[in-house]
Image (spheres, grey):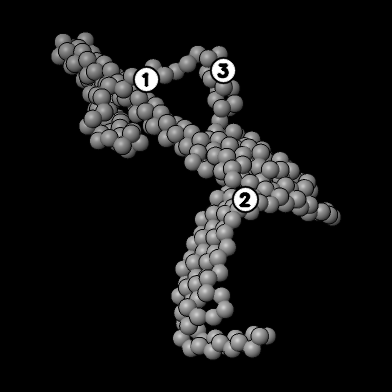
């Protein structure tokens, strides 16, 4: 879209054409003149050559060329918003994957602390049971709680591993290249989060794309309306033509020179 956004695509620059041709033919001629001369020949060679160089320039087309330039600029802006939207999608998915892995890591750290505490309580219950200050059933309950925390820690470690794999997939890197610790420090205060959210909505690429599409629709209407106005075009060129005949009345017929034109047209449109 950026490459197409130029004055030439909008029709603001002259249109230049170059052409040439060569021809060789063998013919039979039969020429009779009023003075009684008669020419009859077979296998007459006729060589032709021509060349032309022309340029045409639209001077006025109802401002259509300016509308097309605005449309090309809008298409370029739309392309940028599409790239931005894809960037936002990738960034958002990566950020969500990071938040997910950081959350699982925080939960695992909490469970590991609970496991350490439950093991300490189990050891304390064993000592109390040995000294006779507590019943053996309390030590059994403490060990059961510790075993339950061990199972939860193992399950949580598996969930963390899956979350790290998902994050590595979004970042397109091996999971072993991720840092061991993921800092969960991206939370914002409510006011800052609201301001960032409002700013993000105003810069949302999908919303910007909708605005640009609305602008493109309005430009298409303007482009159609520009056809109601007269169109003024100018042109100039150089033409060269030669015809060589091996026999006949004209042995060489040659013409060349410059030409110019100014064309005014008006297409009257009637809408229903």
For image coordinates 52% across by 43% down, the residue present is 4
| Front tag of 2 and 1 | 2
Q: Does residue 220 appear in this view?
A: no
For image coordinates 46% across by 68% down, the residue present is 22
Q: Position of residue 232 (x, y in %)?
A: 72, 47
What number is the disc on residue 139?
none
Q: Position of residue 72 (x, y in %)?
A: 58, 40
Alpha carbons under labels 2 and 1: distance apart? 71 Å
**Residue that lies at the very extreme toward the front in this rendered image:** 35
Q: Taking 44 as reference, is 256 above or below it?
A: above
Of labels 3 and 1, earlier in sequence is 1
Q: Secondary structure at mark 1?
A: loop
Contact check, label 3 and label 1, Cβ < 8 Å: no
- Location of the C terminus (image quadrant): bottom right
Q: Secondary structure at mark 3?
A: helix
Of labels 2 and 1, earlier in sequence is 1
The residue where tag 2 is placed is 236
| Front tag of 2 and 3 | 2
Q: Position of residue 24 (x, y in %)?
A: 45, 75
Residue 211's quadrant in the figure?
top right
Left or right of residue 130, residue 59 in this image: right
What number is the disc on residue 195?
3
For image coordinates 22% across by 32% down, the residue present is 176
Q: Which of 106/27 is in front?
A: 27
Q: Secondary structure at mark 2?
A: strand
Contact check, label 2 and label 3, Cβ < 8 Å: no
For image coordinates 60% across by 53% down, the residue present is 258
What number is the disc on residue 184?
1
Alpha carbons under labels 2 and 3: distance apart? 61 Å
Q: Which of 234/215 is in front?
A: 234
Q: Which of 185/208 is in front?
A: 208
Q: Does residue 121 appear in this view?
A: yes
């Amino acid at each position: 879209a950026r490459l197409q956004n130029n004055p030439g695509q909008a029709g603001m620059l002259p249109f230049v054409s170059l052409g040439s041709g060569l021809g060789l033919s063998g013919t039979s001629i039969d020429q009779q003149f009023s003075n009684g001369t008669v020419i009859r020949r077979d296998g007459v060679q006729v060589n032709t050559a021509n060349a032309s160089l022309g340029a045409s320039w639209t001077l006025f087309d109802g401002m259509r060329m300016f509308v097309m330039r605005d449309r090309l600029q809008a298409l370029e802006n739309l392309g940028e918003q599409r790239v931005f939207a894809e960037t936002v999608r990738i960034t958002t998915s990566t950020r969500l994957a990071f938040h997910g892995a950081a959350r699982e890591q925080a939960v695992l750290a909490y469970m590991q602390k609970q496991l350490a505490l439950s093991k300490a309580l189990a050891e304390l219950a064993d000592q109390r049971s040995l000294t006779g200050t507590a019943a053996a059933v309390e030590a059994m309950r403490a060990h059961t709680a510790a075993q339950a925390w061990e199972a939860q820690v193992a399950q949580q470690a598996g969930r963390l591993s899956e979350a790290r794999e998902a994050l590595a997939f979004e970042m397109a890197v091996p999971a072993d290249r991720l840092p061991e610790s993921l800092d969960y420090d991206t939370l914002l205060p409510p006011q800052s989060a609201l301001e960032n959210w409002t700013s993000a909505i105003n810069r949302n690429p999908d919303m910007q794309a909708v605005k640009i599409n609305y602008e493109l629709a309005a430009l298409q209407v303007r482009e159609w309306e520009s056809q109601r106005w007269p169109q003024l075009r100018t042109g100039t060129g150089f033409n060269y033509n030669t015809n060589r005949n091996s026999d006949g009345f004209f042995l060489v017929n040659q013409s060349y020179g410059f030409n110019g034109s100014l064309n005014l047209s008006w297409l009257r449109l009637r809408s229903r």
